Amino acid sequence: MKKTYFMTAACLALGACVAFASTASAKTVEVQELNQGPNGQSMVFSPMVVHINPGDSVHFVATDKGHGIAQIDGMLPKGATPIAGADNVDHTIKFTKDGVYGYKCLAHYGMGMVGLIVVGKPVNEAAAKEAMNGAPFFAKNRLEKAFAELNK
């Protein structure tokens, strides 16, 4: 009886340690929503490309008002939760599936306010690049630069 109790307690303690360690190792990366970026470009997410691991989060900061976030059609891994966030509000989104996530500011998409989040392996990179072809001119231009950065 005591042996069973000890083993059960040891297993529960080990499980708690593993759960805590996986939570503690998850990171949060901050992305600012800006009217003007550090390099002088207007209407940007900074940084434009983020690399994280499954289980990590991205904290979108409404640094300048008038921006929100939404996924770009076709730039979401299969089965992933869509990206969405209201204007003028900070949002933290946890990413669990590998792949490339393309997102935009709805109000400034035509001005090229876009970004990429790469979670683990970019398993849907080809499909995301294909979806980029339907983007407005300035958004497509910035996405091409983002994909070039992704492959460095």
Image (cartoon, rainbow, N blue to C red):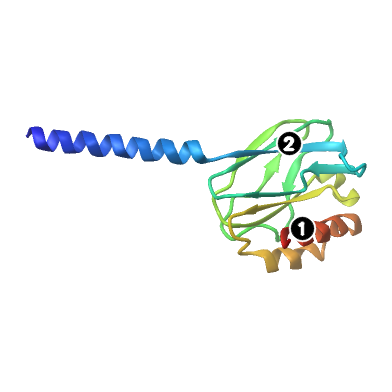
Does 50 appear above or below 77? Answer: above
Q: Check residue 149 in the rendering and tell me which mark sits there, or answer none.
A: 1
CA gap, disc 1 and disc 2: 28 Å
Does 45 appear above or below 127? Answer: above
Q: Image quadrant of residue 80?
A: bottom right
Q: Position of residue 52 (x, y in %)?
A: 61, 48
Residue at 70 percent of width and 31 percent of height: 90
76 relative to 46 in the view: left or right: left
Q: Position of residue 72 (x, y in %)?
A: 74, 54
Q: Position of residue 141 (x, y in %)?
A: 87, 59
Q: Image quadrant of residue 1?
A: top left
Neighbor class of circle 1 (other Cα within 10 Å; few <14, some 14-19, many 20+) is: few
62 or 27, nearer to the observer = 27
Residue at 87 percent of width and 51 percent of height: 112
Which amino acid type corresponds to the residue marked 2 in the rendered image? Ala
Residue at 77 percent of width and 32 percent of height: 62
Quadrant the C terminus occupies: bottom right
Quickly name the residue at label 2. Answer: 86
Which amino acid type corresponds to the residue marked 1 in the rendered image? Glu
Neighbor class of circle 2 (other Cα within 10 Å; few <14, some 14-19, many 20+) is: some
State which mark lies toward you, 1 or 2.
Answer: 1
Circle 2 SS class: loop
- Of the two numbered discs 1 and 2 on the same chain, state the one appearing first in sequence: 2
